[in-house]
Amino acid sequence: MLQRDTVFPSGQGYYDSITPNTIQACLYKMDDKNLAPDADSAQTPKDLPSVPGVYPAHHKMSAAEAAEKEAEREREKIKAQWEAKQAEKKQEERKKAEEARLKAEREALYKDLETLNYELLSLSEYPSDFEIESARRSRLGWFFGLGISVFLFTSSLLNLVHPWVGGIAGGIAFVLWLSHGTGMMQFLPGLSRYPELLAKRRKIKNGVTEYIQQIEAKRGFIHRIYPLVHHNPRLRARKFRRIALMSKEHNLMSNMKTLQDVALYHEYLDECRKAAEEYFRSEREDQMLADLDFDPSVEDLEQELTDNAHDEESAESDQTDQLPEEKSLKTDDNSLKNTDEPAVAPNVTSSTQDDQSGQS
């Protein structure tokens, strides 16, 4: 039998030795299984692999089998399309549920804006530097006045000054001693006002810091309500975007060191509260329109109708303005005609008289 990799030697003598009988014998020996008459039987193995959708040349299907295969492919195609639609539908539902959850979370944060202590954040009771300095100077004056009064009083006891001067100085010293506590005599500067103001300032500062930490918590607060910028353009300012970014990066408290930072935080929350009021008002209006099945495009239609009505009214007013002018023109024409007729009539009568005289 001839092999595929048989190498034929070169030379004309070899080719001359090949006869037709030799070629026929080789062909009979080639693959008797494929040339057997029962090659299509079930017992005889197929040479070609059984690949789905690929059939050998000697395998033939009937019309019913072909229709069944086609119907099965169509069913699989429809099933795949249905599964794809179901997956897309579930994905859309999950997306809507996530949007609804985020919206509910944002609305809860917007409602929390109404419950914040804006009076504490505004630092309205925070002692100013002027009050602190005034209290410090008052304390120095109190010490100075009390010291001089005591000195004069003791000097009068030693007969160094007049007794009247010592008595007056003693009375002043007694009054100053009564004003030591600010609760006793409010109209006089006391010794304890300066430390009280310092303690009050320290208390308010610590309270504001703790309150801001409570508001921000672990997730931050002001950066989560920043979407209110769509309802209040003032929130687009660079200073507000800066503190919102610090809240998102959880380093707001480390950067809040001065009173100006606290005032900026309070201003941001105040603007957000105004924006939240605008947001809820628009939501109520949209809900009312949805309950009434009112189409927003009808509003535009009404506007167009009103514009058309105004145009018609203006056109009618123009026409009414033109009518008196036309009437006046007509009256002028009629008056001109009336004035021309008498001038023409005598000429006509005179011409008729001339004709009659000529005939006579």
Image: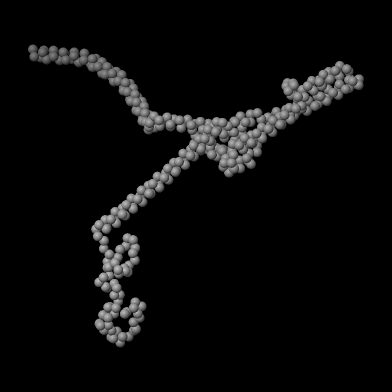
Quadrant including the C terminus:
top left
In the image, residue 59 sits, relative to residue 255, either above or below, namely below
| Percent coordinates x, y for residue 312 in the rendering | 33, 25
**Location of residue 320 (image quadrant):** top left
Front in this rendered view, residue 217 or 257: 217
| Percent coordinates x, y for residue 100 in the rendering | 46, 39
Q: Residue at x 71, y 31 (%)?
A: 199
Determine the residue located farthest toward the left in the rendered image: 360
Determine the residue located farthest toward the bottom in the rendered image: 13
How many labels sit on residues?
0
**Location of residue 200 (image quadrant):** top right
In the image, residue 332 sits, relative to residue 5, either above or below, namely above
Determine the residue located farthest toward the front in the rendered image: 43
| Percent coordinates x, y for residue 299 in the rendering | 38, 30
| Percent coordinates x, y for residue 261 in the rendering | 62, 36
Q: Is residue 138 left or right of residue 157?
A: left
In the image, residue 183 sits, relative to residue 346, either above or below, namely below
Front in this rendered view, residue 233 or 255: 255
Q: Residue at x 65, y 28 (%)?
A: 125
Front in this rendered view, residue 315 or 124: 124
**Location of residue 94 (image quadrant):** top left
Q: Is residue 12 something one can see in this rendering?
A: no
Q: Is residue 214 something one can see in this rendering?
A: yes
Quadrant including the N terminus:
bottom left
Front in this rendered view, residue 44 or 192: 44
Q: Residue at x 51, y 33 (%)?
A: 276
